[in-house]
Amino acid sequence: MFKKLLISGLLLLSFSVFADTLQVGSTLSAIELNTQHGKSVKVANDVKTLIFSVEKAPSDLINSFLMKQDAKFLANNKAYFIADISRMPSMITKMFAIPKMKKRPYNILLAKNETQVAFIPRKKEFVSVLKIAGGKVTAVEFVNNVDQLAKAFK
């Protein structure tokens, strides 16, 4: 009996965490996360694009793309790169991932708890790209190559 209640509770909790996922027409709530440098950044009201990753391969794709851009590319495009690192082992995060991220010439907003970004749509092995206008989501795309990611900024 206890096992059934526990499983039901976990299912309900996981559903409620992801039940309010953004979609076209949704209003973007305030997002405030720390960068890889520990600086708190609030996503500006005039944001146009959010790029989001949960897994290593999509993050590598974003980094590959951004490293070929001007250092102010994200700022110039009113865009933010958000990475969910909540499932990364803390030792790996502290010893390897964060030091590597600190070498990037652009900010990466880091979600260390998945509930901080549970509202962002995601698809396994894809980068989530959200287009925003006037605080509302106008498009949700999932891309898995550099050309598709580049098109999201045109």
Image: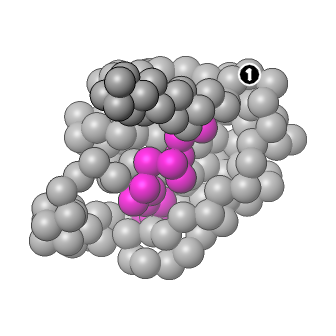
Task: Using the image as rendered, state which of residue 130 and residue 114 is in the foreground.
Answer: 114
User: Residue 86: image x %, image y %?
Assistant: 34, 52
Q: Is residue 92 left or right of residue 102?
A: left
Residue 18 in the image: above or below residue 36? above
In the image, what residue occupies the spot 13% across and 67% down?
A: 91
Instruction: Estimate how packed mark 1 is, as few (under 14), some (14 to 19) or many (20 or more) residues with alpha carbons within 10 Å.
Output: few
Secondary structure category for the residue under label 1: loop
On the picture, is 101 further left or further right than 76?
A: left
Task: Look at label 1 and name its amino acid.
Answer: Val
Q: Residue 48 lies in magenta, yes or no?
A: no
Magenta segment boundaries in residue numbering: 106-122
Q: Quadrant of residue 137?
A: top right
What residue do we see at 23% from left, 40% from top?
A: 56
Q: Where 32 falls versus 51 (above or below)? A: below
- Residue drawn where x is 28% and y is 48% of the image: 87
Which residue is at the front of the view, 72 or 41? 41
- Please provide percent x and percent y for residue 106: 43, 63
Residue 88 is left or right of residue 22, and the answer is: left
Residue 122, image x and y in percent? Answer: 46, 28
Quadrant where the C terminus lies?
top right
Q: Is residue 112 magenta?
A: yes
Residue at the image point whose x is 25% and y is 68% from the top: 98
**Residue at which label 1 appears:** 24
Q: Is residue 66 left or right of residue 82?
A: left
Task: Give residue 124's quadrant in the image.
Answer: top left
